Image (cartoon, rainbow, N blue to C red):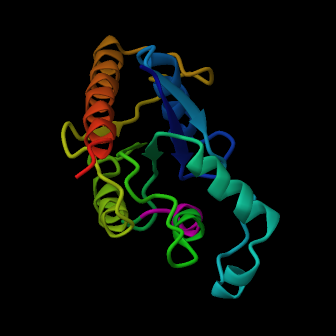
Amino acid sequence: MSYKVGVFIGSLSSDSINRKLAMALTRLAPPELELVEIPIAALPLYNRDFDADFPPEGRAFKDAVAAVDALIFVTPEYNRSIPGALKNAIDWGSRPWGTNSFAKKPSAVTGTSMGLISTAVAQQHLRSILSFVNSPEMAQPEAYVHFTPGMIDDEGNVADAHTEEFLRNWLTEFHIFVVKVVGAQSITP
């Protein structure tokens, strides 16, 4: 069985190293996982005044989340947290009350930066938010990717064999996690 996985890229930059990481994940995913980006750049700032009548961008975003079986978040770290655009997208997807698009969607978190601790702090903040919106998260293995120049090219090719193997294994573990979570949800009490 295959699963469609929505990918959120926390950076809006066209030449983002996190976009390169997301492209690499798409290239390295096992055949059972189809990774598709769910864009977040067009979303206006969330405001609860929209709850009565979501704008087209908000409806399209919620529809895109509803259309996937699982989620991967690829986030940079801005000021020891996640980018505002990513938090804004999560706010859109979880509103209005009672229509949380993230509930029960298995998720995984990764990210890359030039720093030695990569995106560890941002990932912890994101995990806290995902817990609140009831998205079951793959806890292990963690994926903090220390980006070095030339490690991933613009097409998502990974130059470093060790990094490529790590990412393939991480995706395989995520596939196993998705199968478990989705399978557990099909059990009726």
Q: Is residue 38 magenta?
A: no
Residue 87 shown in magenta:
yes
Q: Which residues are magenta?
A: 82-88
Where does residue 44 sit, x and y in percent of width and height?
73, 70
Say which residue appears at 30% left-offset and 15% top-offset.
165
- As drawn, the residue found furthest toward the bottom would be 49
Q: Is residue 177 above or below residue 90?
A: above
Point out the residue furthest to the front here.
Answer: 189
Q: Could you say which is closer to the camera, residue 45 or residue 100? A: 100
Q: Is residue 40 visible?
A: no
Regarding residue 168, the answer to whether it shows in the image is yes
Horizontally, residue 138 falls left or right of residue 44, namely left
- For the point 36% across and 66% down, the residue is 80
Q: Is residue 20 left or right of residue 105?
A: right
Residue 112 image position (x, y, % from top left): 41, 42
Query: Residue 35 in the image: x percent, y percent?
Result: 53, 29
Is residue 73 or residue 147 the one in the foreground?
Answer: 73
Q: Is residue 116 left or right of residue 55?
A: left
Find residue 16 and report its horizontal and vertical position in percent: 59, 42
Q: Tag count in the figure?
A: 0
Name which quarter of the figure residue 163 lies in: top left
Magenta region's main secondary structure? helix
Relative depth, front residue between 102 and 85: 102
Q: In which quadrant of the rendered view does residue 167 lie?
A: top left
> Which residue is depicted at the point 58% across and 77% down?
96
Quadrant of the drawing holding the N terminus:
top left
Taking the spot 47% from the left edge, 39% from the top edge, the residue there is 69
Q: 173 above or below 50? A: above
* Residue 153 shown left or right of residue 162 in the figure: right
